[in-house]
Amino acid sequence: MKKSLLNKIIGLFVLTKLIIHAATNSTYGLHRDEYLYIDQATDLQWGYFEIPPMTPLIGKISLLLGGSDFAIRMMPAIAGAIIIALAIKTVDKLGGNIQAAIITGCSLLLSTSLLGSNNYFQPVSFNQMMWMLLAYQTIKIIQQPIKTNYLILGTIIGLGMLTKYSISFYIFGLLAGILITPERKLIAHKWILAGAGLAMIIFLPNLYWQVDNGWPFFTHMEELRSTQLSNIALGDYFKSLFFEHKGFSIIWITGLLYFLQSDTYKVYRYLVFSSIITIILIGILNGKPYYAHGAFLMLFPLGGIAISQLIQKKYQQYILIALMTIFTLPFYPLSLPIYKISKLKKYCKTLSEDYGINYMLRWEDGSYHELPQDISDTFGWKEMVHNVNEFYTSLPDSTKSSCSIIIGPYGQMGAYNRYRKNYKLPEAYSFGGSYVSRLKKDITYDNQIMLDDRKQSESSWFETIELVDSTEDKYARDPGYIYYRTHPKIDLTKAWNELVDDVRE
């Protein structure tokens, strides 16, 4: 394929991808997770309780560009555009033609999975980009096993580990896939250790941070396992993944089957094995389905090549793309914020009651609701902070000076920190996750505003606890309970210092 033509095809798909997200990414507010990651971007560290440092670092870039919801959301859209560009370049690397490139570009551009992932500022988009880069670099090594390519591979692995630890699953999958094929000889190359060493050097600051902070990764994973991962059945996991790309699942399935039996492409068969191994491994370990989404990406250029060879008439290829798109159409409002929220609610009800399609209404706790969880998680945050301000400003000045604000869930804390400057609200504190590192000792107060997502009826620190407000937004998942606690039972400063010391151990 001519380089100029390849670049034009890539440019067209990248531009279209960015336009789609630019036109839709501000329909709903920020997601609870986005508030956390953007708040972490204001306090850059080598690691966080929930994630490695790459996502907050990217968030810092969006803050430097103005920090609007639009700017924040364009970061994952750019990651998605890079994924599509890499997929098309993979087609070219494997000797595919223009039609294979177009099929690959269309399938990833229109995939509900990638559209949904790239709509939120979360590690998943950047993680998927690193997985795609990793697989693409192994192809370059297959074709040219030279020092530079091994060092680039090590750099990608190191940066990938700084993005999301789950890339280790794909690293394992790729290693296993290569070991069971004749390409295992590449692992014995003299520059493999140099690449591995470079990866370790890049990852080392975060590894040191984990050790220095008592391995919070394992604490976080245990919390996820007890609250979310335990609700994931293996059958549901595989069922979800199989239909994740809706009509465009035909592409990756065809690519998988074609490359498994093709003698022409047998040198690249390890890519199929690596995806299969990674997907099975994550399922056995009770991972969420989206943990494995990156393992499918490299199968799309393989599928684009396969389809272009199995269906050689162009008009038939375009008919197939059209049919896959038509089959996928009903699911686009669930992946992109196309509809206003009231219309989306009615749409979800229609899908559920009339067509029996209700998978998107199942939340992490295993129960079913009127809206998808991720959508509900984008509502109510501004109102919540507004409610805190309304109550705080109603207090006498003498009471304000001795009032502290404590917040439970990370989403509430992130939203509070994002919007409190609009009201000149005081600094708040949280014992949740990464916010422990921001706690201060010797806080003096005798009354307290507490923001939480759970019902509170009594306190071991205060005689009086009163529910003064909550979020009224009917679409919000978080109730935004605001409590006012007065009349201390104990020495609050002493108890506070002891609690801070305890959570930091």
Image (cartoon, rainbow, N blue to C red):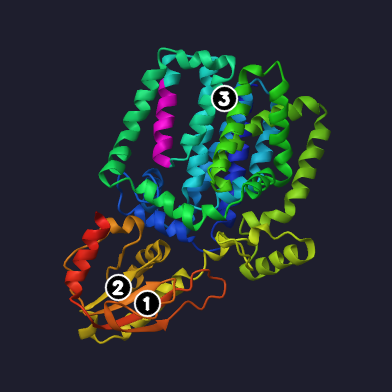
Q: Which circle marks residue 388 in the picture?
A: 1
Q: Is residue 121 found left or right of 309 in the rendered image?
A: left
Which residue matches tag 3?
177
Frontmost residue, 156 versus 290: 290
Q: Is residue 454 above or below residue 169?
A: below
| Residue that carries the numbered disc 2 in the rendered image | 405
Label 1's element?
A: helix
Between label 1 and label 2, give the one nearer the viewer.
2
Q: Is residue 157 magenta?
A: yes
Question: Is there a contact, CB below 8 Å, between mark 1 and mark 2?
Answer: yes
Determine the CA span between mark 1 and mark 3: 54 Å
Q: Nearer the viewer, mark 1 or mark 3?
A: 3
Residue 378 visible in image: yes
Could you tell me residue 270's position as x and y percent?
60, 23
Q: Position of residue 471 (x, y in %)?
A: 48, 76
Along the horizontal axis of the image, is 332 left or right of 441? right
Which residues are drawn in magenta?
Answer: 151-163
